[in-house]
Amino acid sequence: MDSNLSWKFHIDYVALKISKIIGLIARLRHFVPLCTHLNIYRSLILPYLSYGLAAWGQAAKTHLQKLLVLQKRVLRLMYFSEPRAHAVSFFITSNIL
């Protein structure tokens, strides 16, 4: 280990994977109910976020912010909300951390 150890590349990889799944949800959102969206989220996105959670505690906030933005984007898509709407209520309603 050295002082240059960073989680940037791993988080970028995870963000890319999550972005692709968000594209899938964006295409499906008019055709399936909300409960199906939540199941897709829990089965395809949540494992990527929870897998490295313990190790990402030392990651820079700027890198982790990328994942939070993606999480908010998918929730806004699922609830047919405006792109700049507050996502806190969506987190609470869907019981997502």
Image (tube, rainbow, N blue to C red):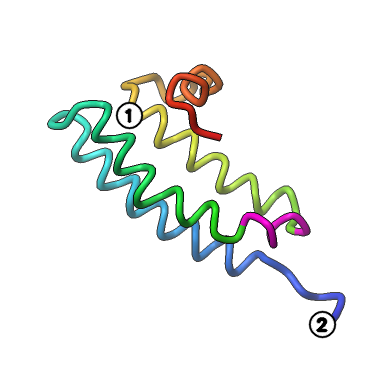
Q: Left or right: where does residue 43 sit relative to residue 31?
A: right
Q: Position of residue 37 (x, y in %)?
A: 28, 35
State the residue position of label 1: 78
Which mark is drawn over residue 64? none
Residue at the image point whose x is 70% and y is 49% from the top: 62
Q: Amino acid at mark 1?
A: Met
Q: Position of residue 20 (x, y in %)?
A: 34, 54
Q: Are marks 2 and 1 in contact (CB under 8 Å)?
A: no
State the residue position of label 2: 1
Residue at the image point whose x is 46% and y is 22% from the top: 90
Residue at the image point whose x is 60% and y is 69% from the top: 9
Which region is colored magenta? 53-58
Whether 55 is among the magenta residues is yes
Whether 32 is among the magenta residues is no
> Quarter of the image holding residue 29?
top left
Q: Residue furthest left?
A: 31
